[in-house]
Image (cartoon, coloured by chain):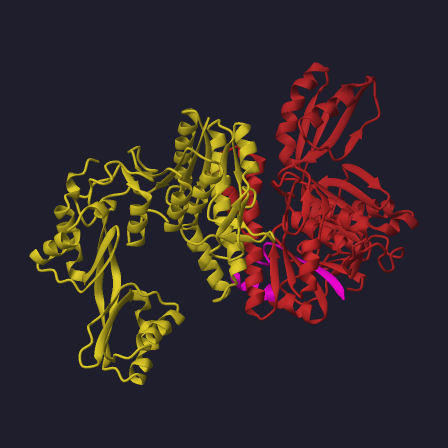
Chain colours: A red, B yellow
Amino acid sequence: MSIIVQKYGGSSVGTPDRIKAVADRIIASKKKGHELVVVVSAMGDTTDDLLALAAKITENPSDREMDMLLSTGEQISIALLAMAIHSKGENAISFTGAQGGIFTDDVHRKAKILNIKPDNIVKELKKGNIVIVAGFQGIDEEQNITTLGRGGSDTTAVALAAALKADRCEIYTDVDGVYTADPRIVPEAKKMQEISYEEMLELAQLGAKVMNARAMQFAAKFNVPLAVLSSFSDAPGTLMTKEAKNMEEIVVRGIALQEDEAKITIQHVPDKPGIAAKLFKKIADANVNIDMIVQNISDKGVTDISFTVVLDDLKKTKEVLTPYVKEIGAGGLVTDENMAKVSVVGIGMRGHTGVAARMFNALAAESINIEMISTSEIKISVVIEKQNARKAMNVLHKEFELDKIEA
Amino acid sequence: MSIIVQKYGGSSVGTPDRIKAVADRIIASKKKGHELVVVVSAMGDTTDDLLALAAKITENPSDREMDMLLSTGEQISIALLAMAIHSKGENAISFTGAQGGIFTDDVHRKAKILNIKPDNIVKELKKGNIVIVAGFQGIDEEQNITTLGRGGSDTTAVALAAALKADRCEIYTDVDGVYTADPRIVPEAKKMQEISYEEMLELAQLGAKVMNARAMQFAAKFNVPLAVLSSFSDAPGTLMTKEAKNMEEIVVRGIALQEDEAKITIQHVPDKPGIAAKLFKKIADANVNIDMIVQNISDKGVTDISFTVVLDDLKKTKEVLTPYVKEIGAGGLVTDENMAKVSVVGIGMRGHTGVAARMFNALAAESINIEMISTSEIKISVVIEKQNARKAMNVLHKEFELDKIEA
């Protein structure tokens, strides 16, 4: 018998009627002869409601107590889903993270799964039960309830699939698969049948909001076949595997957009050893992640250093750096909030040359100016003005013929 | 150091502001030098909201999944209460029933506590933490979450007090103690300083809705000093102990009323062996509890049998008995829905004679007709017409001089 792990997100179980619809879907899978383990998130807005409740008590809740509070969200949805399955005549049993044997470290609110002991789950599967497991939560070695942080239910599902050596892990969400680009921006975007873990990971880190990046890393590491599907339709989704079909032939597989980038330039920095290092350490100490960095060639002993941060971190970064700019005698600090990052991703780039040139030419032909560039083996990212971002996405989608991919 | 177990009911923690007020009260107790274990119920309407949610999924939810669902209610309140205590600068940690070591049998929705392993609680008390434990819930030996049924949080508190050998168990509620009678019915009712377990148990079973009867039995069995106090005032409450002050001097300590009684009379039952037994077995098989029974002296080979049931069970009882009445050739079945039971309770009755006569005379003087009588060593109950119930309460309260008790 084959084991399938299915994961349903908060919007898929947002109301009692949706929970009943999910129950139908689960029973249909079971009737195809699979053993089923189902991971669910909290219903729709439950987590936000619980956060609001905590905010009425204190501005600084302890992480342990927040986990105690937030973990009730999934506990409610697993119970209701089990009831819905029962009412349709199938056997099911729900488990909290602790009961499901999800052991984590003790870092509350962003715990990492250390170990899964799926004995209870296996026992119930053997009895013919559909096993419903609370996503997003686990237990540390002291029996404290922990949560995995945003997107944690995806990780729970993938980790369970790995531990159970499942045939497939299906992530049901409100989109029906992975697209070559966001269809709201690029109307010609096509749904992919398959994509490699590596490409999907890059796309996720570059702004494609399909599923949690950590969950995908987990899937890649343990080679779990991972499908993204819609819980609102029966359309075939996108399968993530180690080896995607026609992998080498397709140069660019997808295009991603991050619109919340801000650029900071420190002008006329004295070009002495250690100054840049100290600058970036100050930023790191403020818990701000720097994305791209560009340093101009030194001219008369001074240089300009530019880098990008996410927009939310701009204020904090300016506060940290302003006194430092004076201290080192730099010329000043200039910021630009209206930046976006557009990235093309594809394993095929490895075997093809000239991808960057094609990309830059296509953008230049539309008079889109590139401010910064960053590349890796399988991706090229450019920072451009936000007002050009949507146009750039469409231009590149056409340039790399993504609209001609077979869905 | 003395350990005190405090229990706060759903109305005491009904809103974030009330939770903060409860936190103040707890911290004040801690500052008096006590080690504190606090048991809380679900916030106000949470349990009803969860029941309504389940009802939208199915009419017949499984008991195990209902426990999974309902137990989230207390989990939310313990987390919020711990946060509130933290925000006021004290140390606290919350525990689910499972984490608190509350082991029960596997009878979901009305589980019984079998065993308490308070190791985690003791460890945290020693660290200087206020320990907050979810009431109403536990875990069975298979790790399933169980609930204790309505009023279960009282039982959790008393059981913890017994297991921890606490100096006192304080039940905070929306009344400020136990009264000689319901003050809404008898304006002269006085709050008692002390009452014996035995008397309190009788009163609770006879309609006084102060606290859960099972919790009181537990307290009596393990001799846990139990106080009932208001969480909305600082008034001294009522202490329940084995030996109440002036116990023997006070003949009647309290008066209770049950207004939801129905009387059923089966007329002209042939007076043959086994007929009454079969009748009551039929009622028991329908899961209906019979309260009082009266059988007239046989007259010409037939007799009338009257008994009372709670009003909610009247319809079911009639359905069960109507065919039987024909089968045995009895005269008919008469019901009266407008009955009430008034009871006087006091350990002092043991040492005093004539209590029943005083009671019946006092009622007769007011032309209140007694339909049925039932007595035990420390109580006398009468069934009367509902319209006379409130008057009867006041008459008896005066007759036994309960208004002269020192508060």
Q: Is residue A79 above or below residue B329?
A: above
Q: Quadrant of the C terminus of chain B?
A: top left
Residue located 68% across and 53% down the image: A185
- Queried whether the magenta region covers residue B172, the answer comes back as no
Q: Give the answer, above or below, for where A324 lies relative to A61.
A: above
The stretch in magenta equals A1-23
**Residue A64 lies in what quarter of the image?**
top right
> Residue B183 at x, y = what percent?
21, 46
Residue A14 lies in the magenta-colored region: yes
Q: Position of residue B330 (x, y in %)?
A: 25, 82
Task: Locate residue A156 relative to residue A274 in the image: left or right.
Answer: left
Task: Describe residue B124's horizontal placement relative to residue B334 as left or right.
Answer: right
What residue is rendered at 86% in x and 56% in y?
Answer: A243
The answer to whether residue A178 shows anywhere in this view is: yes
Rendered position, A137 above or below B278: above
Name which residue lies at 46% across and 35% down: B165
Which percent across, then down, holds residue A227? 74, 59
Q: Nearer the viewer, residue B70 or A21?
A: B70
Tell me where residue B149 sits by quadrant.
bottom left
State the image coordinates of residue A27 (x, y, percent, origin top left): 64, 68
